[in-house]
Image (cartoon, grey):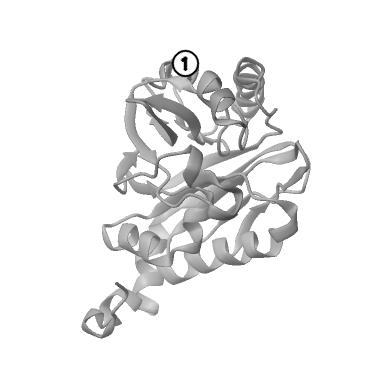
């Protein structure tokens, strides 16, 4: 099955949600010229990564995800396109979550995922409550899953999703230029070891003193770069073909050859 995916590598303004929502809509509109099946955005697309102090973040976070769902749900319905809306800072039940929403072509929320691993060097766990579940969803018949940014450094999380049947994995991020090589290498490793397509969409530009790397990637199950964006804001569209996955997994059958009784990771 062939599908077109648009990577929306966005320069997210720190602490300006309404400007970010408007800019995201404009970039998605530009992407639609390529008639994509799926649009994918970066991490904390509403507020950037991330406004401080805690009181400021709480004031800017999306209450119940309502604004995020309104903006992206409406766009998905009007354009008949699936959207993996990066993630947003969402306030719910007295906590703030780094939450991703996925929308189908009718604009319905079909999945949500709260980032499990907060990036402790930045103090993220002090501001955001970590998620408690993985996520599975289907886009146009393709079994999918996702994680957010720092989660990519935990291969057991992503292998769990691969074992559950994911053929297409999404990774929105706000990854800094200082560790750009880690970003590219880890994304490729996760695609190769799990023999699945991986769509990793990063922020670009500056937020405070941090410069984000860009270098968003669309990777094949062999780790081939179907798309590799630069460091500036950019929208590009690539094509995947999930029909090749079965042959790849049969030729090097890591799932059959696993010996889970030997793995002690707790």
- Quarter of the image with the C terminus in it: bottom left
In the image, 214 versus 251, the foreground residue is 214
Q: Residue at x 44, y 49 (%)?
A: 147
Count of residue discs: 1
Q: Residue furthest left?
A: 261
Q: Which quarter of the figure has residue 248?
A: bottom left
Name the spot of residue 150 as percent of width and height, x first: 52, 54
Residue placed most toward the observer, 65 or 128? 128
Q: Is residue 113 above or below residue 255?
A: above
| Residue 122 drawn at (x, y percent) | 60, 49
Picture quadrant where residue 7 is located:
top right
User: Can residue 141 be spotted in the picture?
Assistant: no
Question: In the image shown, does 233 or 261 lie closer to the viewer?
Answer: 261
Residue on which the image places disc 1: 67
Q: Position of residue 185 (x, y in %)?
A: 61, 67
The residue carrying pointer 1 sits among few (fewer than 14), some (14 to 19) or many (20 or more) residues within 10 Å by Cα, namely some
Q: Residue at x 75, y 44 (%)?
A: 210
Q: Position of residue 123 (x, y in %)?
A: 56, 47
Image check: 161 left or right of 220?
left
| Residue depicted at x 50% and y 30% | 88
Left or right: residue 134 compared with residue 14? left
State the SS at label 1. Answer: helix
């Amino acid at each position: 099955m062939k599908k077109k995916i648009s990577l929306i590598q966005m320069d997210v303004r720190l602490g300006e949600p309404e400007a970010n929502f408007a800019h995201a809509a404009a970039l998605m509109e530009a992407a639609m010229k390529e008639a994509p099946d799926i649009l994918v955005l970066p991490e904390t697309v509403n507020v950037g990564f991330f406004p401080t102090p805690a009181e400021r973040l709480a004031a800017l976070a999306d209450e119940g995800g309502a604004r995020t769902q309104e903006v992206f749900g409406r766009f998905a319905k009007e354009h008949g396109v699936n959207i993996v809306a990066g993630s947003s800072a969402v306030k719910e039940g007295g906590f703030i979550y780094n939450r991703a929403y996925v929308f189908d072509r009718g604009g319905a929320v079909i999945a949500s995922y709260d980032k499990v691993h907060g990036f402790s060097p930045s103090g993220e766990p002090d501001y955001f409550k970590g998620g408690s579940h993985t996520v599975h969803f289907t886009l146009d018949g393709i079994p999918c899953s996702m994680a957010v940014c720092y989660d990519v450094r935990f291969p057991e999380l992503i292998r769990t999703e691969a074992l559950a049947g994911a053929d297409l994995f999404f990774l929105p991020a706000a990854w800094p230029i200082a560790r750009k090589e880690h970003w590219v290498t880890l994304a490729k490793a996760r695609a190769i070891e799990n023999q699945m397509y991986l769509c990793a969409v990063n922020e670009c530009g500056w937020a405070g003193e941090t410069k984000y790397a860009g270098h968003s990637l669309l990777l094949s199950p062999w780790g081939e770069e179907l798309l590799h964006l630069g460091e500036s804001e950019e929208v590009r569209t690539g094509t995947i073909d999930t029909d090749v996955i079965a042959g790849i997994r049969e030729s090097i059958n890591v799932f059959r050859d696993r010996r889970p009784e030997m793995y002690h990771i707790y």
